[in-house]
Image: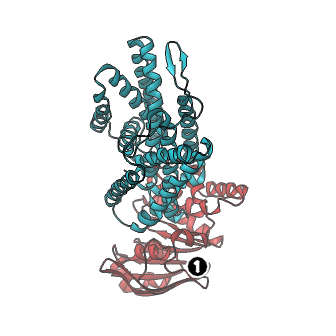
Amino acid sequence: MRKVVFRGMKADEKRNRVLWCSIAVVALVIALALSLKGSKGLQWVISGLTVGSIYALVAMGFSIIYASTRVINFAQGEFSMLGGMLMYTFSSQVGLPAWLSFILAVTVVTALGAGFERAVIHRMEGASVVALIIVTIGFSIFIRAVAKWIWGTDPVKIAAFLGEEPLRFLGASIVPQSFWVFGFTAVAVILVFLFFNRTLPGKGMRAAAGNPDAASLVGVSTSTSSLLAWTMAAALGAAAGIIIAPINFAAYSFGVMLGLKGFAAAILGGLGSAPGAVVGGLILGVLEIMTAGAFPSGYKDAVAFLIIILVLLVRPQGLLGKPEGEKV
Amino acid sequence: MLQVDKLSTFYGNIQALRDVSITVRRGSITTIVGANGAGKTTLLRTISGLIEARHGLVIYEGQDITNKRPNRIVRKGISQVPQGRQVFGGMTVAENLSLGAYVRRYSNRVEVEQDKDMVFELFPVLEEREKQVAGTLSGGEQQMLAVGRALMSRPKLLLLDEPSMGLAPKVIQSIFRTFFKLHEQGLTILLVEQDAKIALETADYGYVMRTGKIALEGMAGELLENDEVKKIYLG
């Protein structure tokens, strides 16, 4: 009996240790960047954290669907792309105010995600996870084709929510949009974490992923659980695509890279873990910007894939993930 | 209370249940014994909606519940303790119990807390382990947690699937004593068990299953004395 208790405590301690280690890694990466070239280093960190926050949001979308259904949704990046393009349509083409355009764009993408779950994923009940993953790849290709048809291939510019004038800070410049990115990401992460770890419906969704039969037997509807996961992931993805659009532009093709980066961030932090998504996203963002600064910028996209390969070799469950991947 | 009428279930083309009919009387402990692969677990899983029946009916308190979704069936008062316990390994004992009360998530919290205390009274070791992750519990403790979780939905009918599996004789004795206690408090129990001896000693009425069919039925005491049952299942 004593041994059992000991084992339980040890697992907890180990998780905490890993959490602190990950935070240390983030701090180290930031310190490294800062020490490099004075104000340029600070600039890298700010830019890296901004783009890293977006990766974190996309990674969270991957994690939510994975943690609830064990499916990896390769259309996750397309949700962000659609969010950005719809924002452009509502705010720039139709001329609606930014807040209303934001709400409308998120709503449309969320409805699309939920509709896809009901129309396709739900009907494939009993199909293998691999089959479902392939269907999401097909869905992403479809969305991209339709987006290209509607908006064409040229990137579009979206006005920042609150002014474009960069703020000066210790020699580095910060665009105001970055604060929207940081704020939104922080709030979203905290809400998602609380939902999955403190509320009964959230715990029910985790249970449905880890053990669908046992979860059904206590009354969790695995079908509702999957629908909710897709809805949340689509909403988060859309919001991520919208808030980054004023900094990075938007185009029909941007979803692919964003999706892959978000996936890399999720793998790095631990697929299925919300804190892991943030840690993974921020590390990836900063490393990428540093690479772009130190080497020809074409190399920066390689960082994400190098990270996927290294993590899968060294620590397949990611920095904060548990081997069973039940946590969100 | 529960009537299963000519139920047939298939896995692909393989028929796992052949016209199985059983009756569970209110307030009874009814048991289904039989060898591995006889279809006992399939029967329970069909009753609770995890597997679809091809023919036949499941009638619970006069209502047809055949092929209803499992989450609907729990709401009606049938709770199953699955084979191999299947606790939520990554969550704490307390979280497992709260999830057991999932169907009551909009009802009175105080009542749910009281039921948790009731489970702790039945299984004091769970209270000691309240904050511990369920995956780190011993087999016996996990079985207690699985039973406690099933009780948290306030069932009228408890389905138990092989509760003795992989447990030490002493632990089995103690868990079966709890089943008897629950029965005395008015809970109806349908017990599926490979260990025919302990099952028939606990139950009022018993069925013997063989290759997907009911081979024998009768009062549990009589089945215990039955020569065929003695020879094949009691050794």
- Compared to residue B153, the image places residue A43 above or below, namely above
Q: Residue at x 38, y 25 (%)?
A: A289
Tell me, what hue is chain A?
cyan
Q: Which residue has dot 1 on it?
A: B28
User: How far from the left and from the top, in percent, is residue A75?
Assistant: 39, 51
Mark 1 lies on a secondary structure that is: loop
Q: Residue at x 30, y 79 (%)?
A: B14
Q: Residue at x 38, y 44 (%)?
A: A259
Is residue A141 visible to us here?
A: yes
Of B75 and B131, which appears nearest the observer? B75
Disc 1 is attached to a residue of which chain?
A: B
- Compared to residue B184, the image places residue A30 above or below, namely above
Residue B121 relative to residue A144: left or right = right
Tell me, what hue is chain B?
red
User: How far from the left and from the top, in percent, is residue B171?
Assistant: 48, 58
User: How far from the left and from the top, in percent, is residue A10?
Assistant: 45, 35
Is residue B141 visible to us here?
A: no
